[in-house]
Each structure stands twice: as structure tokens, then as C-alpha cells.
């Protein structure tokens, strides 16, 4: 009994003094995971900040005239030029110049029920065969876009019968 107790005491004493050494690999793994999680949440905050800047700037541009081929505040915007300008100037993200090339890009396709602020929403005229329009989703089933010649940048609803029927897809460039 004395030998067992002494052996047990020595084991406990040894474990106490060397526990940091014995469990160092466990502690190290925990700190690595924590750092990774912290980095991931930092990236999410950066994305969120960029998206908010893009959407806020889009609101500021409401009323700017449509201009075919336009990509600037001073000359006006066409629909794809508006998105190119917003993502480049507010988020430092370069996206393709035309609506068709945006849609054909490798950016993630987003189901309509998963739309988030800052997603690009694509339309085909009356559900037709040719992709011909894009806007930026701002939440609450609404989007900002440069509609056509003679009009200005404005907000419309995806629930509107025309836009609902013409809706085709969405992509996330951030």
C-alpha cells in the first residue's frame, strides 16, 4: 500500500510540475485556431465595410443621368459602368466591364433567396434570351441601377412585375 501511494504521489507531483510541457501541443493548437477565427472575422468586417461603402455611394449617385458606355460621375453611367465604377472606387475590386462578361465571370452565383446588399442582380428584357441589364442589390427586395437613355440612376423593386419577370440571376463580387 505504501509503494502504491508513493508511486501515485510521485506521478501526481510529476504531472503537476510538467503539465505545461505535457499539454503544450494542445495549448498551441488552441491558439492557432483562435488566431484563425480572429483573422476570418476581420476579413468579414472588411468585406462588410466595403459593401456598405459601395451601397452608400450608389445611393449618392441616384439622379445621375444614364449614358450608354458611361463610367463616370461627370459623364453619366450605363448599367454595367455604374457597377464597375462602384466596385473599383469604393472597394478596390475590378469587375468585368459588360453585363454579359460579369455574368460569365467566375464570381459566385447567388440564389435569389440568398441575396445580400452589394450583390449584382442580372435581368433579361421580359425574360428574353439576351442578358441586357444589371443593378446592385441594396436589401429589402430593392436595387439601384441606371435604367436606360433619358432616365437617371434610381431605386426599383424586384417585386415590380417587369423586374420580377425579367430577373435572371445574381453574382457576388466581394
Image (cartoon, grey):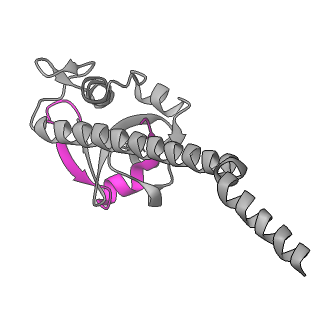
Residue 88 in sight here? yes
Q: Quadrant of residue 14?
A: bottom right
Q: How many marks?
A: 0
Check the image and report above or below for 95 versus 124: above
Question: Horizontal and vertical percent for residue 69?
Answer: 27, 18
Is 103 inside the magenta-drawn segment?
A: no
Q: Quadrant of residue 149?
A: top left
State which quarter of the image contains the C terminus: top left
Report the residue that reaches farthest toward the bottom. Answer: 1
Residue 122 in sight here? no
Task: Give whichever of 46, 167 is nearer the camera.
Answer: 46
Q: Residue at x 57, y 47 (%)?
A: 33
Task: Give whichever of 95, 27 is nearer the camera.
Answer: 27
Q: Quadrant of residue 57?
A: top left
Question: Horizontal and vertical percent for residue 11?
Answer: 79, 64
Left or right of residue 27, residue 67 in this image: left
Question: Horizontal and vertical percent for residue 59?
Answer: 15, 42
Q: Which residues are magenta?
A: 147-174
Task: Give whichever of 12, 121 is nearer the camera.
Answer: 12
Task: Give whichever of 17, 153 is nearer the camera.
Answer: 17
Report the residue that reaches farthest toward the front. Answer: 2
Amino acid at each position: 500500500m505504501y509503494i502504491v501511494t508513493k508511486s501515485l504521489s510521485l506521478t501526481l507531483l510529476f504531472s503537476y510540475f510538467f503539465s505545461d510541457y505535457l499539454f503544450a501541443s494542445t495549448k498551441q493548437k488552441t491558439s492557432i485556431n483562435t488566431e484563425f477565427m480572429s483573422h476570418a472575422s476581420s476579413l468579414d468586417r472588411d468585406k462588410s465595410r466595403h459593401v456598405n461603402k459601395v451601397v452608400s455611394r450608389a445611393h449618392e449617385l441616384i439622379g445621375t443621368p444614364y449614358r450608354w458606355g458611361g463610367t463616370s460621375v461627370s459623364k453619366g453611367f450605363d448599367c454595367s459602368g455604374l457597377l464597375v465604377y462602384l466596385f473599383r472606387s469604393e472597394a478596390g475590386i475590378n469587375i468585368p466591364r459588360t453585363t454579359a462578361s460579369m455574368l460569365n465571370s467566375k464570381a459566385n452565383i447567388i440564389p435569389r433567396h440568398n441575396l445580400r446588399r452589394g450583390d449584382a442582380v442580372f435581368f433579361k428584357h421580359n425574360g428574353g434570351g439576351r442578358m441586357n441589364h444589371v443593378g446592385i442589390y441594396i436589401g429589402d427586395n430593392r436595387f439601384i441601377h441606371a435604367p436606360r437613355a433619358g432616365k437617371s440612376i434610381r431605386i426599383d423593386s424586384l417585386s415590380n412585375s417587369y423586374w420580377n419577370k425579367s430577373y435572371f440571376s445574381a453574382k457576388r463580387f466581394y
